Amino acid sequence: MVFPAKYPSLNATQMTEEARQALIRVLRIAFPHPQFSDGPYERTADTILKEAEEETWFRVALTQGLLSLNHLAGGDFREVDSDEALRILRRVDGTEFFGFVRRTAVLNLYDDAEVWEAVGYEGPSFDRGGYLHRGFDDLDWLPDPRIEYPEGEQMPDIAPHALEVPRPAAEERRVDSTNQPGTTSSDMEEVKK
């Protein structure tokens, strides 16, 4: 990674539509969800580009990362098949570029209302009074529990020894001739061995 002060021309790098499309491809490969439309990936890419515009270091990391992807792809990263694209991303997963993309994508891709709808997440509940009275207890995949037992049938004993309190075994007192700490007891703030 080069530093912005050493190469001032990188400070003025503008993100092109080509860079945006490459970034969308990175997101699709790194966070593969066939049921997601392009919208959440595009919005996440736009958020990454916006953050890169606000911070020179991230802009440089993003520019160099996208150039590196093209270099590793032997041309245009957007053109390689998904398996090769994944292999390329694994080669750069420890870079500042990939860390920046991953951090921003995790926080923004999965905070998209369209993504919530696609995965069946109803969204946060605090503004609607919590989950308790909004279907939290709606377990339609389990059979209804038996509330009452027929006369003569005994309820099963789930934990027969649950009320028994175990007693510790009697501690043996040994005389220790070593200088090592051992079992102590406290009596009126005096420690006895």
Image (tube, helix red, strand yellow):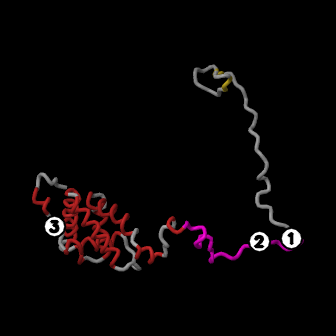
Q: Please name the amino acid that badge 3 sits on.
A: Gln
Gap in angstroms between the C-alphas marked 1 and 3: 77 Å
Q: Secondary structure at mark 1?
A: loop
For the residue carrying disc 2, how many other residues have a C-alpha within 10 Å: few (<14), some (14-19), or many (20+)? few
Gap in angstroms between the C-alphas marked 2 and 1: 13 Å
Note whether residue 193 is visible: no
Is-magenta flag for residue 141?
A: yes
**Position of residue 164 measured from the top left corner of the image (x, y, whole percent):** 79, 48
Label 1 belongs to which residue? 153
Dominant SS of magenta comes to loop
Label 2 belongs to which residue? 147
**Position of residue 167 measured from the top left corner of the image (x, y, whole percent):** 76, 40
Q: Please name the amino acid that badge 2 sits on.
A: Ile
**Position of residue 127 measured from the top left corner of the image (x, y, whole percent):** 50, 66
**Position of residue 1 measured from the top left corner of the image (x, y, whole percent):** 19, 55
Q: Does label 1 or label 3 sit earlier along the sequence?
A: 3
Q: Is the residue 157 above or below the residue 116 in the image?
A: above
Q: Residue at x 20, y 70 (%)?
A: 70
Q: Does label 2 or label 3 sit earlier along the sequence?
A: 3
Label 3 belongs to which residue? 14
Image check: 10 left or right of 29? left
